[in-house]
Image (cartoon, grey):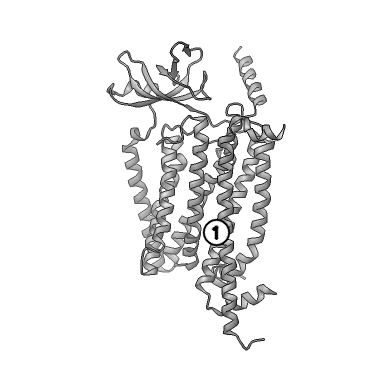
Amino acid sequence: MHPIRKQRLIFISVFMIAIGIACALALYALKQNINVFYTPSQLLQTKLSRQQTLRVGGLVQNASVKHNTSDNQVCFVITDDHHEVTVYYTGLLPDLFREGQGIVAEGKLRADGAFQASEVLAKHDENYLPPPVAAALATKSETMHA
Amino acid sequence: MTLLSFLKMGGYAAYVWPAFGSVLSVLVYNSAKAYVTYRMLIKRLSSMSETRHAPYP
Amino acid sequence: MSLWTLWYRLTSPKGFTYFATACIPWLALGCLLTLAYGLVAGLYVAPADYQQEDAFRIIYVHVPCAFVSLLIYSALTVAAITCLVWRVKLANTFVDAAAPVGAALTLLALVTGSLWGKPMWGTWWIWDARLTSELLLLFIYCGIMALKNAFPDKRQGSVFKNAFVVIGSVNLPIIHYSVAWWNTLHQGSTFTLLGPSKIAPVMSQPLTVMLVAFSLYAALMVLLNMRNAVLLECQRARWVSAWLAKRKR
C-alpha cells in the first residue's frame, strides 16, 4: 500500500478507537441515567428521595392484582424474581396488562415503601407466536410443572 | 374472513394502516422522484448532445 | 480480467453508469415482487400474535425500516473510509446518494415504532436507550446531508463530511446493543445469531421476505441517486453522448 494511504488508514483507525473509548466511558458513567426504569432489586439498593419521579419495571406477580371497582384503583405486585414492590395505580391499564406481563410504572415512592404510579406502560416481550402454538406451549409447561 | 374484518385489523386499524400507508407512500414518492429526475436529466442531456453534434446524421 | 481492473472500471463514471443501468430494472422487479409477497403474507397469511393480536403486523414494516437504516449506515461508514484513505470519488457519490435514503428509513422506523408503541405500550414515545439512539441516527443522517453543501471548497467539504460519517458510526453498536446494555421499554432482539429464534416460522418468513424487499429497495434508490449525480457531473463528457445514443437504440 502507498505510504500516505497507509498513514491515513492508521490515523482513521486510531481516531475511531479513541472515539469508541470516549463514548464507552461516557455511557458507563451515565449508566444509571440511561436505564429507563429501576428493577425492584435496584430500587432497594439505591437511596432515592420520595419527591423524585421515577419508573419501576418488572413482571406482574401471579394472583397479585386486586381491583377496587368503586374508585377504579388497582393494586398489584411487580417482581424481578428476587425482590418485590407493591404498586398502587388509579386509571386505565394498557391492553397488554395481565398477570405475568412485564410492565413499567412511572410515579413516586410512598412512605410505606410501596409505589404510587401515575402511569403504567406495558413492556411486551420479543416472542411472537400464533395463538394455538402459544396455548400448546402453555399446557406443555403446565404438565411439566405437574 | 370478510373484507370488513380484514380492514378492521382486530380493532387496531387506526395503527396498522397508517404504519403501512406511511411507509409505502414514502417509498413510492422517493423512488418516483429519483426516476423523474433521471428522465428530465436524460431529456436535457439529449438536447445538449444533439446541438453539439448538429451535422451528425 | 483481474479483480483490480474490474474495480477500476466499475468505479469510473462511465463503467458505473453502464453497470447501474443494467442493474436497475432487475432490482426494481425483485423489489416489487418481494414487497408484494411480503405485504400479502404479512397482512393476510400470517396469523395474529397470541398477545399483541393484529397490532403485531406493524413489525413487517417497522423492523425492515430499522434494519435497513442501520445497514445503510454501515455501508456509509465503509464508503467514507474508502473515500478518506483511497480518495475514490465514487465512494463520495455513494455517501451523498445513500444518506437521504437512510434518513427516510430512519424516520419511517421511528413513525411506525410510535404507531406500534401507542396501542401496545400505552405511549407514543419514551426516552429509552433504543428510541433515543435511533433518533440520534436520524439527526446524524441530517447532519451528513447538511454537510454535503456546507463548504465552498468541494474537497475540503468531502473530508469533513466523511470524517463526520466515521464519527457517527459509534452510534451503530449503541443502537444494536441498547436493549441488552440498559433497561429499556423496547423489547430485546427477536433474532439472535446463536440460539433459537423467538418468532414462529409462519410469522418470521414474511419478515425475512420484507427484509430482502427493503434491502433491494435501498440498493435501487442508491443506484438511481448515484446515476443521477454521475450524469449531472459528467454531462459534458463524450462517453455520455455515446451512452445516450446507445440507450435510444
Quadrant of the drawing holding the C terminus of chain C: bottom right
- Tell me the SS state at disc 1: helix
How far across and down, in percent of the image, does residue C110 sit? 48, 42
Q: Determine the chain carrying the residue at label 1.
A: C
Residue C93 image offset from top left, x and y in percent? 49, 64
Q: Nearer the viewer, residue C85 or C187?
A: C187
Which quadrant does the N terminus of chain C fall into?
bottom right
Q: Residue furthest bottom?
A: B55
Q: Residue at x 32, y 37 (%)?
A: A30
Report the amino acid beneath label 1.
Answer: Val
| Residue C184 in which image quadrant | top left
Q: Is residue A46 above or below residue B41?
A: above
Q: Which residue is mark 1?
A: C222
Residue C45 at x, y percent in the picture: 69, 36
Q: Residue furthest right?
A: B1
Q: Is residue C12 visible?
A: no
The picture places residue C16, in percent across and down from the top left corner, at 57, 68
Residue at horizontal 67 percent and vertical 74 percent from the top: C248
Vertical placement of A126 versus B55: above or below? above
| Vertical arrangement, residue A31 with respect to residue A54, above or below | below
Circle 1 Cα neighbour tier, 10 Å, few/some/many (<14 / 14–19 / ≥20): many
Task: Classify residue A146 as left or right of residue C99.
Answer: right
Taking C159 as reference, is B22 left or right?
Answer: right
Q: In the figure, is residue A38 to the left or right of C100?
A: left
